[in-house]
Image (spheres, coloured by chain):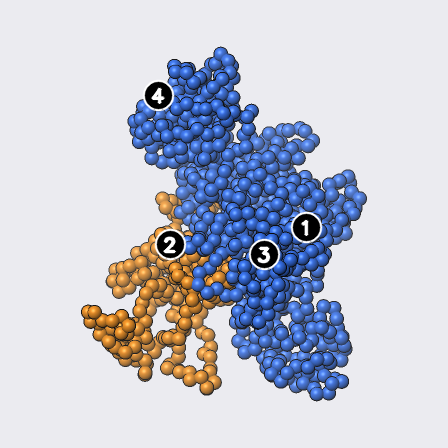
Chain colours: A orange, B blue
Amino acid sequence: MNIPESIQRRDFLKQLGLASTAALATNGTQAWGNEDIIHPAAKADSCILIWMAGGMAAPDTFDPKRYHPFEKGLDVNKILSTFPAIDTNVDGLQISEGLENIAQVMDRGTLIRSAVQPDLGSILHSRHQYHWHTGYVPPITVAAPHLGAWMAKVLGPKNDVIPPFINIGQRLEGVGEKEELKAFTTAGFFGSEFGPMNLPYPEQAVKSVQPPEGMEPGRFSNRYKHFKKLLDQNPNRELMSDFQRESMLRSMESAHRLLQSKEKNAFDLTLEPKDSYAKYGDTRFGRGCLLARPTR
Amino acid sequence: MHFSPIHILLSLFLVTQAAAEIDFVHQVMPILKKNCAECHTDGKKKGGLSMNTRAEFLAGGEGGEVAVPGSIEDSYFLELTASTDLDERMPPKGPGVSPEELKILKQWVEEGMIWDDAITLGSSGWEPQMKPRIVKLPKPINNRNHPIDRILDHYLQEKKVSLPALASERTFVRRAYLDIIGILPTPEQLNAFIHDKSSDKKTKLIDQLLAEDVSYADHWLTFWNDLLRNDYTGTGFITGGRKQITTWLYNALKGNMPYDQMTRELIDAKPDAAGFINGIKWRGSVNASQTRDMQFAQNVSQVFLGINMKCASCHDSFIDRWTLQEAYDLAAVFSEEPLELERCDIPTGKMATPKWMFPEIGQIDPKANKNERLKQLAKLMTHPDNGRFTRTIVNRIWAQLMGRGIVHPVDAMHTKPWSEDLLDFLAVQFSQDGYDLRKFLKFVMTSEAYRSQSDRLKSSPGEEYVYKGPVPKRMTAEQLMDTIWQVTGTNPNLPEAKVDRSPKTTPRSVSESKDLPKIEKVTAKWIWAPDPQTRKIKLRTSIDLEKQPAFTSLLATCDNAFSLRVNGKFVTSSREWTRPAFHEVSDFFKAGKNLIEVNAEMFGGGSGFIAQLSFGKEKGANTLVTDQNWEVQQDKKWIPAKAFHKYGAGPWKRILDNAVPSQPGQSAFDGPSVRAALVKNDFLMRSLGRPHRDQVVTSRPAELTMLQAIDLANGAILSKYLNEGANNLKAQATDGQKFVNWLYEHTLGRLPTNGEEQIISSVMTDPKDTQQVEDLLWLVFMQPDFQIIR
């Protein structure tokens, strides 16, 4: 039986569990500060963090204030929310007009309106991002691991072929703060073993699990076959049966297993039906979300 | 007892992660320190009770157990601390534990007495001496006379470990090249060594490698950049909150500046070395442990003394004896303003006094101004009685050469060394040798220990490590790049680092007074190989002279790079076509036939080399110019070069008119091949462990991870090098077996076995196929005995 490839991709995603939605709040519990707080047991075994860097104005999205429609010449001090608030499916929780679809699923989310930013000076994006991604306000005395590296370290890979921490769509090129931007998507002091697999361009993600440009898959797998044969013939193999060699060969094996596996289809966006592109937005961000998307 | 820094940090983070409400480190520890530590830690066990660790505390004292996790009733110590009867109360003296503190202790017990294994209430068990210690060498065993062997041979005997066998000559040569200059011996260099019959050839090789100033600096720059957290880009540079020390550092390495002088210039900072002590000025509000003052305290103590002041920057350290006060006092040496202690970001009201931690050899005058204080600290740091200073650096270098420190980790110098005698001996030797880093490398590398076969370790060596021979080292990201570039000829074109890499050629004092008249008429032509797309070419010509010329001017440039020799001697080079070389070079010529050789390289786009030599200042003097009479090497044959353009034509116009006279061997864009330490970090190097240098880094990852393996298997950067490399090597590859032998000897230091040859012959079915060459290159570069230095 032939399974359409688009389904294959989703099946793989399901197997990987790459994509269970992050466990968020249970029904409408609200804390008032004086009752005993019951922490829900952590059930999520994987997590997608959608990072929307950039200037989304809170009063016109998730934190509406008094509605004051925009008019020409409006004094800047009077600008509050330029859109009216709308009800959501959570009692007492309102968000801005324009987010009607989101309003209908707010019972499945937790809205944090209490975060206060530290003063980190001008040109501050990267440092705030460091804070949010690692939990630590930079600078600190050590290189802090990214949230994803914590998961990689504590939970480990869900599927032994796919790396446990995948970083999709991060702009690492051409921006003034690029070195600093990179600084927080690392495993920090955990060591690179727990670091991210970086897929900066979602539509090119498949390239990171394919043979290098211009190399036929046959040539690629042959090359690895020959590699293993050469190892067998290495006259010094007994002399170097040490941990460094072993870990090197183990890692080469894992890499090639991924690069020759069926799971690598999970990285191939061309296998998605065209209408998914439209739904998610045919942009770098939208395609990134599509790449990370859970199966439904 | 000691712990690796990673482990410690991890436990600190995990402590705060734990579900418990009580935080041991911040809430319980201060109570226990204040009330219990005096009588129950650091070897003191009143009533048989020791409380250095949780395990000891739970084990109890003479009267049985005193603490039971989870049970307030069974935890007798709670009863004792709560007692109002002063005869039985603990602690017996002082005001005792307050009701609030008792509440915290009770809750802590109830929650299971969370206390991480890595955290000790006492100070650590080992306190190194301050003063250097003269070690009396044991008698040599079996005539192994080198002091290192005399100590180690006895150590091995004591540990009942058999002497490691000597490594093969090939292994030794490869190791020595990679350790001193960071690149591989060529097969010619390797075989020259093997065929050398002299008995002192190993020492000779080491001397010869150590004399390669530029290559030595190119390689060791990586280690020192990591240690002094120097980089070309990154956090802080964007707002000028950070300065490089590259030029100073490179010159120090190239000129072999003694380490004590380096240290003085770093602490009592020379302007171009000040980037080190000034650290990174972060924008906005910064937590109290990351001000420039505190960075100073942390970096100075870590780098020069292997002391971790990071913990003590927020609170008295939980893992060693350093206190918040000591960290701030050291920071105050650097601080412009009076400095108030902050504990975990909360001001304490206490002020710091500028001083350092070891008054036994002298102290800083707290009233002196900042410059004077730094001068005093620099002097104390490099004081002949500061044994910690020398032990720290010799241990670091030992770890670089031998794969593992005598003290491990190298930044925890309060940890007991596996051989105190060896460490103390090396430290004294180093200072007696004038803090000469290269001399110290030679000292270690001339021991039989360095020349031994490496130890086969089944797992990463832990605390119970016993020396059995050198530990194999994984190539650093920079070494891997350098060696791959070296074999494939794919080095980058221009360095990022602003450094002077000209070899110190002093060709019989070229006179500076000889003025260089402008060349009136350039008749030279732009020449290249017949195929203008050839990337690398060799050119040559010769000229007969009746006598040595009194005056000779050389004017030359190349799109993109060239280096020129006369009669085998290096004269000049340039990697930037807009900067022609223009020198007086008569000293390089002699009566009779003179050979002029040029290595030229095109980076892409246009190609061309042009040169004009004038023998004499007068009009109509004898000249030699580039034209079709020059020869170019093609397929190992010399054929006439092709003259493509007259001077003034082509994309270069009249570029030679801008030439500025300079000394031979000193052109600004000079160049041996550009090395990895001199260029910015890229994705591949970053993946392979080249760090962001926001913090001091003193060791690189020893094992290859899966993500790194993916980058090596299919990453675009490596693929590009292999692809270009296969092209560069395509003519050579047609030699078939000869090429394979060359490749094996160059990369692995040995010839392929019959078995390997057979497999390779099934890869290389058609030596003209560059894809096959590319695959072969990958196969060889991925061998563990390529990437691991044994």
Who's the residue at 35% across and 25% down the image?
B526
Q: Nearer the viewer, mark 3 or mark 2?
A: 3
* Whether residue B309 is visible: no
Who's the residue at 47% across and 42% down the image?
B498
Same subunit, tags 4 and 1 = yes
Residue underneath mark 4: B521
Chain letter for the residue marked with disc 1 in the picture: B
Vertical position of residue B95 compared to residue B123: above or below:
below
Q: Residues within 10 Å of mark 1 (few under 14, many from 20)?
A: some
Vertical position of residue B488 compared to residue B5: above or below:
above
Q: Earlier in the sequence, mark 3 or mark 1?
A: 3
Q: Residues within 10 Å of mark 3 (few under 14, many from 20)?
A: some
Chain letter for the residue marked with disc 2 in the picture: A
Looking at the image, residue B176 sits to the left or right of residue A97; the answer is right
Looking at the image, residue B235 sits to the left or right of residue B155; the answer is left
Q: Residues within 10 Å of mark 2 (few under 14, many from 20)?
A: few
Q: Earlier in the sequence, mark 4 or mark 1?
A: 1
Q: Earlier in the sequence, mark 3 or mark 4?
A: 3
Q: Nearer the viewer, mark 4 or mark 2?
A: 4
Q: Name the foreground residue: B556 vs A220.
A: B556
